[in-house]
Amino acid sequence: MRKYILIILLIAGLMITACNRFDNSLTKPSEESHEVGDLIVSTFESLNTEELEPLNALFHEDYLYDGISQEARIAEITALFAEHENLSFEAKITSEKHIGAANAELNWQLIAYVEEELCYNNIFTGDKAIKEGGSWKLLGNMLDSEEEETPAQLVIAEYFTFSTCPNCPPAEEKLRDLAQAHPNFIFLEHHTMIHYVVTGNDNHGYYGNPSAPAAVFQGQNVITGSSADALASYEAIVDSYIDEPAVFEYSIDELNIDGGVLSAKVIFDSKDAIDFEDMYLNYVVVANEMVNPVKPAENFYNVVRGLGHQSISASDMNQPIEINVNLPADMPTSGKLVVYIQKRPAVFSHNARIYGGEVLAFN
């Protein structure tokens, strides 16, 4: 009897130990640290004319961002206090990625206001940070000049189709292949009849109602049909645009979906001199996948479910532009918001150039 009791106690002890180990292995890890972003936010929230020392603590002595050194960056920021009264800063952290315990990389934005009027806006992409002596410091992107950092533009194809189109599948497949091959290429699938038509979508008519399948690349090249020659031209056209540097830098903020309406704020900036005549800010919401009602086993991708545009001018640069897009009841919970600037003359003549753009996925 004693032998059996000892065996039972031994098994119970092993079960307790095993349970403890099992529970510990499933303990939810702590949320990823955002201590660099928190430091940036707190630094600029407390910044004032009497206490500028936090800037020296924030920017590393080896800081270099697009050729701007630590000394030049601090001088740039402190000069704002000399130029403006009632100055306030807002730092917005878009992402923070840690690479080990002492290295991080951030995307963030710094905005300054005089009362409620915007007077400074700068977007920092790929800003590196290092932890030394227990404190984080920003290193910048370590590039010598802005020209080296200028990213390639987003290339956009506006693709026109419909659910019963017999010749469209090869064209859509080719566009999906191009999107997989080029991270800075996206196609926006506009349905022109039957299913998934968006009320008020005049893009197809603006381009002259080309026969489906039709793809308009960067607002300039119109290709119809799905012959081998047509599909080969897709690739040649994308290749001609894909490495062009971006003219505008875009930032999308405060995206929200409420009551079937997507809202957000868009800021754009350009270092080039731009003619803003006939210039519009476009905003398009696409669903990642939509079922083909004709062939339920197949899906459509990047289907346009809502859109809008508004005229812009040079005075809108660096100013938050509020956008609103009405969404249909069958809009999936996940999709993308695509914003882009386009020169859109009253009459299309292969001259409606798209100036890059930005894509923000949402769930």
Image: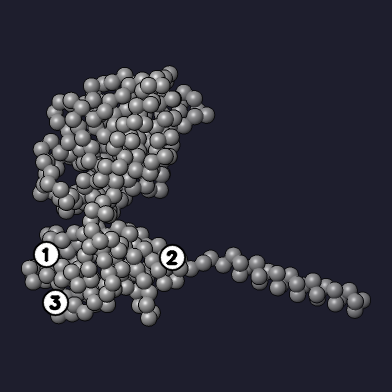
Q: Secondary structure at mark 1?
A: strand
The residue at which mark 1 appears reads as: 114
Count how many numbered circles sit on residues in the image.
3
Front residue of this view, candidates 198 and 232: 232
Tell me how far mark 1 sits from mark 3, CA to CA: 14 Å
Q: Quadrant of residue 167?
A: top left
Tell me what residue is drawn at x 33 percent, y 34 percent: 238
Check the image and name the residue furthest to the right: 1
What quarter of the picture does the N terminus occupy? bottom right
Q: Position of residue 171 (x, y in %)?
A: 40, 26
Where 320 sits versus 142, above or below?
A: above
Per the rendering, the mark at residue 314 is none
Q: Secondary structure at mark 3?
A: loop
Tell me what residue is drawn at x 49 percent, y 25 percent: 295
The residue at which mark 3 appears reads as: 49
Asked which colour scheme the image uses, the reply is: one colour
Q: Position of residue 63 (x, y in %)?
A: 27, 69
The residue at which mark 2 appears reads as: 99
Q: Amino acid at mark 2?
A: Ile
Image side of residue 167 versus residue 60, left or right: right
Q: Quadrant of residue 158?
A: top left
